[in-house]
Image: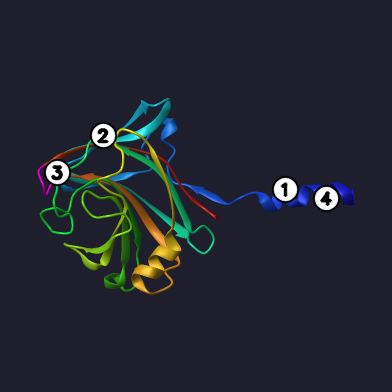
Amino acid sequence: MLLLLALIHPALQAQEITIPISDFSNLQLNDWQQKSFKGETQYQIVSIDKQTVLQAQSTATASSLYKEMRIDLHKTPYLNWSWRIDKKLVINNEQSKQGDDFAARIYLISENKWFFWKSKAINYVWANSSPKNTIWPNPFAGKNVMMLAVRSGDDAIQQWHTEKRNVLEDLNKIFGEDIRYIDAIAIMSDTDNSSGSAHSYYANLYFSEQ
């Protein structure tokens, strides 16, 4: 019996904690809400590359799909996802208000409900001209909403890219403080400021222990 427990215990220890964000395979978006900033980006579940994913189509529009969920980054600090864009946006300076559009972005919000002006957010974006790992304040929201280029204009389009970010470390680096909780996550493809168009896909969003 002791030998059996000794064999089982390491296996239990090895099981990683994961928190799923999307389950697009069930063909529903019932647990997501849409917020419009200008018009509506069209979000729908489609099948592509032998998997069921979220498709986003934006033509001079800006709206997001968002889900309120509390994530303890001390337990599951890593955000994992896959994304793909079918064409690049024609934007010279995405760090300006006129160029603040992205074919694909993941938006994480840490909300302090007692002091709402202290809410912090980070955008992981597929940039157009800014190099990878460039960080800048959102031109509309200022330094409480920071942008981080995970992909850029020189990355291949029409193919999937899989990402893993240590959100706890990114928030600490950007804001200089230990932000333990994420309270909402949003998916957004927007082209309203540049009057362009985007066609993008998202899949396999989840938080993990490592």
Q: Quadrant of residue 109?
A: bottom left
Query: Mark 4: which amino acid?
Result: Leu
What residue is drawn where x is 41% and y is 35%?
24
In primary-sequence order, the first of circles 4 and 3 is 4
In terms of secondary structure, where does tag 3 sit? loop
Per the image, the residue denoted by label 1 is 11
Per the image, the residue denoted by label 2 is 86
* 194 in magenta: yes
* 131 sits left or right of 74 in the view: left
Per the image, the residue denoted by label 4 is 5
State the image coordinates of residue 22 (x, y, percent, origin top left): 42, 42
The reply to whether residue 208 is in sight is yes
Mark 1 vs mark 3: give the one in front. 3
In primary-sequence order, the first of circles 1 and 3 is 1
* 23 sits left or right of 175 in the view: right
Cα gap from disc 3 to disc 2, whole angstroms: 13 Å
State the residue in front, 128 or 209.
Answer: 128
State the residue in front, 13 or 110.
Answer: 13
Per the image, the residue denoted by label 3 is 90
